Image (tube, helix red, strand yellow):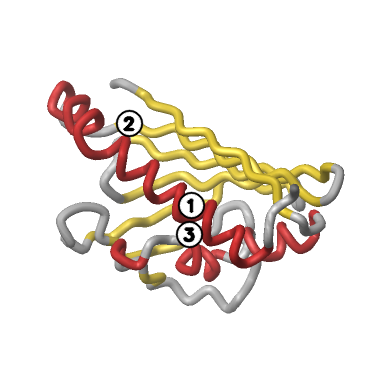
Amino acid sequence: MKVYTLRREQRLPINLEVAWAFFSSAGNLAKITPPEMGFTIVSALNEEPVYSGMLIEYRVKPLLGISMKWVTEITGVDAPQVFTDRQLKGPYTLWEHTHRFKSVNGGVEMTDEVKYALPLGWLGRIAHELVVKSKLKQIFDFRTETLKKFFGEIK
């Protein structure tokens, strides 16, 4: 199984507590996901922040407008610095997304690190090169630009 890593860093002019409050609320994920993904949270979240063992079910249209179920489990939380979500059901063989937050001069540095793998062996590797890698880049580019609109950026 070929494992890929996507890593993004972004600095926002907000404090650690504001960053944690926003990103640890799973309901905010829809706000920073491209609309064409058709991202909908199915689980009743009650606006509670993420916690270890939390299960979150979504509906998402990752490719070709085909809707699918995606279930993640929050596998580790060390508030307000880090939390990790892991896909239990969805399009990937492996999806582990770690969100890190650190105070920096003028705000907070947010780091996303996603380790992921695709099914179907060599066909999955071809799909990664042709479609998946650029799709993930688009999703995280959208997230970066949306967060700039919400919070601004550190100059």
User: Residue 95 appears at what percent x and percent y?
Assistant: 40, 39
Tell me the element at label 2: strand
Frontmost of labels 3 and 2 is 2
| Alpha carbon separation for disc pair 3 and 2 | 21 Å
| Alpha carbon separation for disc pair 3 and 1 | 5 Å
Q: Residue furthest front?
A: 155
Whether residues under marks 3 and 1 lie with C-beta atoms below 8 angstroms apart, the answer is: yes
Q: Which residue is mark 1?
A: 73
Q: Quadrant of residue 93?
A: top left
User: Residue 96 appears at what percent x and percent y?
Assistant: 47, 39
Whether residues under marks 3 and 2 lie with C-beta atoms below 8 angstroms apart, the answer is: no
Q: How many marks?
A: 3
Residue at x 15% of width, y 56% of height: 64
Residue at x 77% of width, y 43% of height: 102
| In this picture, residue 107 sits left or right of residue 100 | right
Q: Quadrant of residue 67?
A: bottom left
User: Residue 85 appears at what percent x and percent y?
Assistant: 51, 47
Whether residues under marks 2 and 1 lie with C-beta atoms below 8 angstroms apart, the answer is: no
Q: Which residue is mark 3?
A: 55
Asked if 57 appears above or below 136 in the picture, the reply is below
Q: Nearer the viewer, residue 11 or 39?
A: 11
| In this picture, residue 16 sits left or right of residue 52 | right
The numbered disc on residue 117 is 2
First in residue order: circle 3 vs circle 2: 3
Residue at x 63% of width, y 47% of height: 83
First in residue order: circle 2 vs circle 1: 1
Frontmost of labels 2 and 1 is 2
In the image, what residue type sits under mark 3? Leu
Asked if 41 appears above or below 153 in the picture, the reply is below
Q: Nearer the viewer, residue 30 or 75?
A: 30
Q: Report crowding for label 2: few under 14, some 14 to 19, many 20 or more residues within 10 A (C-alpha).
A: many
